Image (cartoon, rainbow, N blue to C red):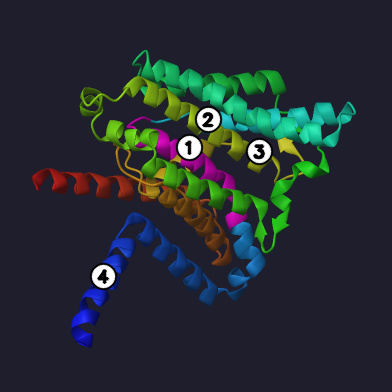
Amino acid sequence: MTAATGTPQGNRWVDGARKIFGSQEGILLLILIALIIGVGLYNPRFLNERNLTDIINANAYIAVAAIGISMIIITGNIDISCGAAIAVLWSLSGTIAEVLGTSGWPTPVVLALAWIAPVLGGMLISAVNGFFVAYLAIPAIVVTLGTFSILRGGLIFVAGGNTITDLRDGLGIAHQSIGMLPVSVIIMIILTGVAFAWMRWSQLGRSQYAIGGNKEAARLSGLNVRSSLMKTFIIAGAFYGVAAVMYATQFSTIQTVVPAGLELQVITAAVVGGVSILGGVGTVIGSTLAAILIRTIGAALVFVDISPFWLRAILGVLILVTVLLDIVRRRRQERM
């Protein structure tokens, strides 16, 4: 009787384990653990608690931005302007903190505006992208490539690449911790969990998968595709704004320039995390794990005495492999 009743329970545990570790998220987690252990055996300093915490903390803003881009990609679209938008928004945050701070404004007011303005600004920028994509039916890659150029050129024209230095001490939330975890990491974990639940159980979240899976079928089923796409872009912009604040608070100074390849890092985190570039598939848990994995790979290269310049080549390989596997998976499903 024990064996009879235990076997089904055991099978459930086995099936559950297969489901978890057979998923993209599970595979990423196993790779991440194996990488940490492997590099740690080669160079024990890699396993230093401070080093591991810094790895996650440094890329927490990439993970948050990847949540936003994941939502857009799941709908079958793309946002090339995400990196430029984030740079503009962290420059906005720093400028507000510098100008108002040196003008004698109360610190709580300065910090509130420096944190809120980038979020609202990100929503506005993405609303423009969303309008052209959703209501004018212009391909997202064309719209966001144009936005990228405007934002990047506009930032250079307005800010001139200047460095923002006079920042309030309270702006640096990335240097604050609750217990053993930095505030940025806590924000990343909370937003990942909230976004995952929202995309899985909310009407708009489910509509993103429906649109990405088959846009025409979603429309015929009664879904307001235009409105859903518009809202998705706006929500993604809010995540860009939060990511910008998280980045701005890492340093005592802020460079008002668009870092080369920032959008590539964000999009790579989403795609490697299992978000199908063709739309309709993926989770933000995967994109967050991928963002951590990418940073871990970069740090690991230093600890095993390999030039960090190889990281971009590795990212390119990861994207190609992930996309190819996604195409193979889709073709198998079509044959079934």
Q: Secondary structure at mark 2?
A: helix
Residue indicated by mark 3? 245
Gap between marks 3 and 2 measured at Cα:
13 Å
- For disc 4, the neighbor class at 10 Å (few under 14, some 14 to 19, many from 20) is few
270 with respect to 122 (left or right): left
Question: Mark 3 Cα within 10 Å, few/some/many (few <14, many 20+)?
Answer: many
Amino acid at the residue labelled 4: Arg
Are circles 2 and 1 on residues that touch, CB within 8 Å? yes
Which residue reaches farthest top? 136
Q: Any mark on residue 237, and which?
A: 2
Q: Earlier in the sequence, mark 1 or mark 3?
A: 1
Q: Nearer the viewer, mark 4 or mark 2?
A: 4
Distance of mark 4 from mark 3, alpha carbons?
Answer: 43 Å
Q: Which mark is residue 68?
A: 1
Report how far apart the C-alphas of labels 1 and 4 lie in the structure.
34 Å
- Circle 4 — which element? helix
Vertical arrangement, residue 316 with respect to residue 146, above or below: below
**x and y, in percent, of residue 186 in the image:** 61, 53
- Along the horizontal axis of the image, is 164 left or right of 130? right
Of mark 4 and mark 2, the one earlier in the sequence is 4
Check disc 3 and report its element: helix, strand or loop. Answer: helix
In the rendering, which numbered label is found on residue 12? Answer: 4
Q: Secondary structure at mark 1?
A: helix
Identify the mark nearer the N-term, 3 or 2.
2
Residue 58: say if magenta.
Answer: yes
C-alpha separation, residue under disc 1 versus residue under disc 3: 15 Å
Q: Amino acid at mark 2?
A: Gly
Return the residue found at the far bottom: 2
At 26% across and 75% down in the image, what residue appears? 9
Residues in magenta?
56-77
